[in-house]
Amino acid sequence: MTAQEVERGRFVRQQNRFTDRITADGSSGYPAEAGRYRLFVSYACPWAHRSLIVRRLLGLEDALPVAVVDPIRDERGWRFPDRDPVTGAVFLSELYLASDPSFEGRYTVPCIWDTVTGRLVTNDFPTITTMLETEFTALHRDGAPDLYPEALRPEIDELDDLVYHTVNNGVYKAGFATAQDAYEEAFDALFATFDRLEERLAGRRYLLGDRITEADVRLYPTLARFDAVYYSHFKCNLRRLVDYPNLWAYARDLYSVPAFGETTNFDHIKRHYYVTQRNINPSGVVPKGPLIDWTAPHGRGADSGA
């Protein structure tokens, strides 16, 4: 977070600088080609986590190589554990400044690098997953799910808008608030939406019914981080995820899917937030808990009644 991202005590997320698109027909100047692009992520970052889930669900692992930054970030930004073998960068900031020398702000993940032009194409996290879902279809694995079906897009988009403002970004608005009213406003909106989602999931397995969609991909990363980080670190402590029977079972159901569970790295998540965000946790001490069994039976299969 930068000083520019707090206005009158409220957290206002910086705008994404690179918003070009990769397209199936190449009309954008960036054609969807196997091996041409490089996806930069952090296991700690919920926005990057989305892209990892979708990449895995769609079978794009070979078509879209990935590089993972270290979870501990300092004033120089995200650092690669070893020099990135393709770009030669040590810090992600090098790639931002190579693409735009005048860039000022946080160097964010996820972002996609084009090896042909030698520049960042996009760091626009809201559109990266839908781009992978709709423009990379020729590279999807056989039998890949349609995560953004055209008939459901209006409902997915409406739900995503609510979840983004009150849950995904809502926890940050609570955690980074420097005014009591701003904190309470975000806090109340977050748990009001949690209550709505708990009720919604009482009668359906996933947010849109019996199939995983983009809506589930966008909600899950916040749920995965909630009890480990947001409940205490961001003061979102009205209730824990485990206190919501349907939301908690739903989260475990998704975790049991390899694309979700195997991209969830609690060590990276906890070390990033508690060590990096010294404005909230000055000591940098990482809590040992909570003790939660994400592999416990969730009971939300096709015959579970959910």
Image (spheres, helix red, strand yellow):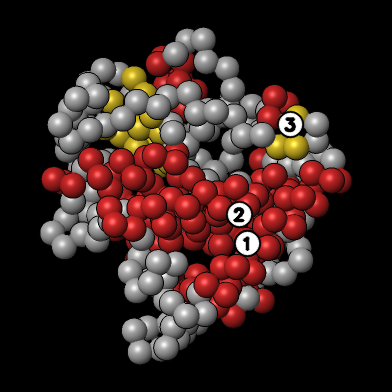
**What residue is pinned by disc 2?**
167
Give how far across and how far down residue 162 sits, in percent.
56, 53
Residue located 34% across and 58% down the image: 152
Q: Are marks 1 and 3 in contact (CB under 8 Å)?
A: no
Q: Earlier in the sequence, mark 3 or mark 2?
A: 3
> Is residue 267 something one can see in this rendering?
no
Task: Please give the label number shown on residue 54.
Answer: none
Distance from label 2 to label 1 (Cα)?
Answer: 7 Å
Q: Amino acid at mark 1?
A: Thr
Q: Amino acid at mark 3?
A: Val
Q: Are marks 2 and 1 in contact (CB under 8 Å)?
A: yes
In this orientation, which residue lies closer to the viewer: 79 or 31? 31
Is 73 situated above or below 286? above
Give how far across and how far down residue 190 sits, in percent.
67, 57
Task: Please give the label number shown on residue 6.
Answer: 3
Give how far across and how far down residue 41 sits, in percent.
43, 41
Q: Earlier in the sequence, mark 1 or mark 3?
A: 3
Residue located 40% across and 16% down the image: 99
Give how far across and how far down residue 210 sits, in percent.
34, 74
Distance from label 1 to label 3 (Cα)?
Answer: 23 Å
Q: Which mark lies nearer to you, 2 or 1?
A: 1
Is 194 situated above or below 127? below
